Image (tube, rainbow, N blue to C red):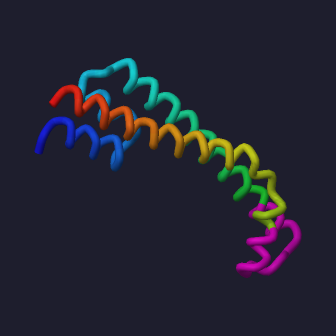
Amino acid sequence: MTKSTKALLLSALVYPGTGQLLLKRYHAGIAFIIISSFSLYFILNNTYKIASKIIENITIGGNTVDFTNLLSMVSQSETSQLNNAVTILSITWFVSLIHTYFIGRKTD
């Protein structure tokens, strides 16, 4: 397996930017890792906030826990920041793969 193939698999399956680090493109790799990490932090933070609100509503209101009730509570939550963070993470991951592919082609 060539080094460029390993780098592409690292970027695809492990974390964006790890393939660039393997190919010794440290600035690009660290940039992808930082952007992805901030996006992942916002995703986890917003998911935790939504889950906490739902748990609080169930505890205070004494609502029954069924799928339709949970779905309505999630849909009432503000998810625009969560959607933005998921979009940024997806785009970063995709750009990282393309960048790794082209760098790998140059090194081979």
What residue do we see at 19% from left, 26% from top?
107
**Magenta region, residue range:** 54-72
What residue do we see at 66% from left, 52% from top?
47
What residue do we see at 53% from left, 45% from top?
90
Q: For the view shown, which residue lies furthest in the right direction?
A: 61
* Quadrant of the frame with the N terminus: top left
Residue 89 percent across, percent down from the top left: 54, 42
Residue 52 vs 98, above or below: the answer is below
Q: Answer with left or right where residue 63 lies relative to residue 70.
A: right
Who is closer to the viewer here, 71 or 80?
80
Residue 100 vs 84, above or below: the answer is above
Residue 2 percent across, percent down from the top left: 13, 40
Who is closer to the viewer here, 107 or 89?
107
Q: For the view shown, which residue lies furthest in the top direction?
A: 27
* Quadrant of the frame with the C terminus: top left
Q: How many marks?
A: 0
Residue 30 percent across, percent down from the top left: 41, 24
Residue 18 percent across, percent down from the top left: 33, 34
Who is closer to the viewer here, 8 or 106?
106
What residue do we see at 38% from left, 41% from top?
15
Quadrant of the rendered image containing residue 20: top left
Residue 52 vs 42, above or below: the answer is below
Q: Answer with left or right where residue 106 lies relative to residue 31.
A: left
Residue 63 among those drawn in magenta = yes
Residue 31 among those drawn in magenta = no
Residue 19 vs 9, above or below: the answer is above
Dominant secondary structure of the residues highlighted in magenta in the image? helix
Quadrant of the rendered image containing residue 84: top right
Who is closer to the viewer here, 8 or 72?
8
